[in-house]
Amino acid sequence: MNAQLGQLWVYLQANPLGWLTATLVAYWIGVKAQRAAGGRPYVNPVAIAVVLLVALLAVTGTPYQTYFEGAQFVHFLLGPATVALAIPLYENWPAVKRSLVPMLAALLAGTVTAVASAVGIAWALGASAESLVSIAPKSVTTPVAMGIAEKLGGIPSLTAVLVILTGIIGAIIATPLLNALGLKDWRARGFAVGVAAHGLGTARAFQVNDLAGTFAGIGMALNALATAILVPVLWHW
């Protein structure tokens, strides 16, 4: 039996679809765990999937590049998934139009706070300039954040890790934190989560409320644009 399982693993490891399957199974386990926990935000499917996949790669000694070659179809789907956010945006367009001015004010405050707080704390702890610029775009979706960091001389791989951690933490604490603050407007809740925790926060917002998810998607997109403009300007200044 063990020999058969070993042969099966050798086959799956050599087959690109094996890593895609492993990714989907890891996320499925995360979803099941969250449902078993009654949908509690701290049981986050993405965090669970990341831990399981990292453990699997470590145990099998598989390089990340080998894993990515098999699982890159999931990465490809990020594009269509982002474009699909236009559907709830269209359906809730009247509510969006009424909130344009407050959103712009919240965007400016959120973008500046996300960058200044992270960089300020890292600077106070003695982080290098290379690390500081890698930290600055941590609240932006991964491709944009890595592009900003690379352009300014940061470490894109470090930025990617920080972006994922920011999204996971944001998705976990957003609901209890906003509840504790007494914030009941789904537009404000969603926009705040999108600005602070990009795609993972947006996915969590859609789980809670469609209107919150719509505004989270808008916040995620606008924050990516604002950060891409502001961070290079502020960094050189």
Image (cartoon, rainbow, N blue to C red):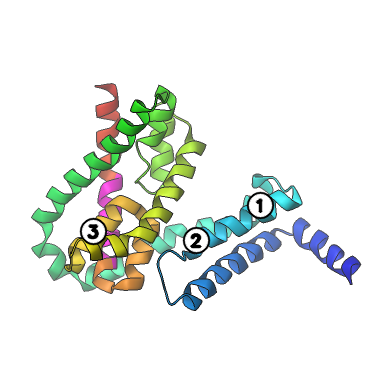
- Report the span colored magenta: 213-224
Tell me where residue 213 sits by quadrant.
bottom left
For mark 2, does the 10 Å Cα neighbourhood hold few (<14), some (14 to 19), or many (20 or more) residues? many
The kind of residue tagged 3 is Phe
Which of the marked residues, 2 or 1, is nearer the chain's N terminus? 2
Q: Is residue 161 magenta?
A: no
Dot 3 corresponds to which residue?
191
Dot 1 corresponds to which residue?
67
Tell me where residue 8 sits by quadrant.
bottom right
- Tell whether 167 sits left or right of 36: left
Give the x, y percent position of residue 126: 40, 24
Which one is in front, 34 or 225? 34
Quarter of the image with the C terminus in it: top left
The kind of residue tagged 2 is Val
- Tell whether 4 sits left or right of 130: right
Which of the marked residues, 2 or 3, is nearer the chain's N terminus? 2
Q: Is residue 158 above or below residue 71?
A: above
Give the x, y percent position of residue 35: 48, 77
Can residue 84 be seen here? The reply is no
Q: CA distance from mark 2 to mark 1?
A: 17 Å
Give the x, y percent position of residue 108: 17, 44
State if disc 3 and disc 2 touch (CB < 8 Å). no
The kind of residue tagged 1 is Tyr
**Res 46 label:** 2
Q: Nearer the viewer, mark 1 or mark 3?
A: 3
